[in-house]
Amino acid sequence: MKESLQVKVREQLGSRQSRRLRASGLVPAILYGHGEKSISLTIPDSQVKHAVQHGARLVDLSGDVTETALIRQVQWDAFGLEVLHLDLSRVSADETVEVVLPIHLKGTAAGTREGGVIEHVKHEVRILCPVVSLPEHLDMNINALHLNQEMTLGQLTLPAGAKLLADADEIVVHCVKVKSEADLAAAGAGGAEPEVIVKKKAEAAAEA
Amino acid sequence: MALMPKRVKHRKSQRGRIKGNATRGNRVVFGDFGLQAMQGGWIRAQTIEAGRIAAQQYIRGEGRLYVRMFPHKSITARPLETRMGKGKGEPAAWVAVVKPGAVLYELGGVTEEQAKLCMARLAHKMPIRVRFVRRRPA
């Protein structure tokens, strides 16, 4: 689904001005692409959060700039609470874009009834996809996943005209046996004190 | 058994200071949910282990727990009732240096309700303020 963002052209540039904008509830952004001049923008914080939290890729810009854009990058603060900056790139409907999409698992794996645990190894995938068929996420059905089996990127159902930009043999999810408490304790067991790395005298003399 | 490095270059380290927020390791990477530090501090190996056990006992083999911190730093202590001087004390504990924003534990393969309950149990073991976090949108 396309989200719409009300944008204003930003005249004041620089980190100090950006900080002031953020304090007043606006998010600094930049729009670039198609060989045209890049434009610095501001977008209301609430609209940005809504678009980002809903996993929107394509956004309709209105206000000072009327265009369709792709969210290229989102910069977060250290706690992941606030969006600091947004990178938008111009796109047209007939274009193909490179995007990173999240992979969502659907269903319940048969392996969980066989004493296994689902391990979601790969959460995101890079694909080349036409703008018109760009989804918010990719789904993978894991109903047929048994114990000690895995599903790979090649088993993903891609949108029409999309191409995978990663190794198709890469594991997305697998069902493995649960590690017992004893195994975990054994893995963590060590000596009373770590070994100290010391250069031996002969080695030091050889180096000199 | 509490965590500690296998090999070290020096047995003892200086205390150092925790400055700024975590710029790496501040997002959920392996699981779906996480426990994020809101304060900086030292977390002892025993505390990390206590947290792991509290969470592991709750999830009981349903999901997968990831521990995202490791105690790389040794802390020395002087024996009780000893006079000052005679050099730095002997290593007494190992700690993980945590900056605000760092993700300490992650959990995958469970529902959000289960993850929240599990992380709440785990949070009680932590000596610093923490919060429950979800995976950030890609």
Image (spheres, coloured by chain):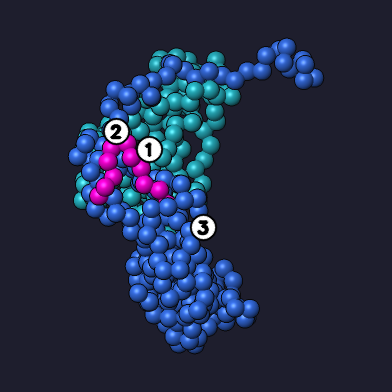
Chain colours: A blue, B cyan
Q: Are marks 3 and 2 on the same chain?
A: yes
Left or right: residue A35 versus residue A143 is right
Rendered residue at 45%/82% (across/down): A61
Name the residue beneath numbered marker 3: A165
Name the residue beneath numbered marker 1: B67
Quadrant of the drawing holding the C terminus of chain A: top right
**Is residue A150 highlighted in magenta?**
yes
Q: Are marks 1 and 2 in contact (CB under 8 Å)?
A: no
- Give the alpha-carbon distance from disc 1 to disc 2, as whole Å: 19 Å
What's the residue type where badge 3 is placed? Answer: Leu
Query: In this view of the protein, can residue A86 be seen by the observer?
Result: no
Of the numbered discs in the image, which one, if any, rests on residue A145? none
Left or right: residue B118 versus residue B82 is left
- Please tell me whether the stretch drawn in magenta is mainly helix, strand or loop: loop
- The crowding category of the residue bearing disc 3, from other C-alpha atoms within 10 Å (few below 14, some 14 to 19, many at least 20), is few
Closer to us: mark 1 or mark 2?
2
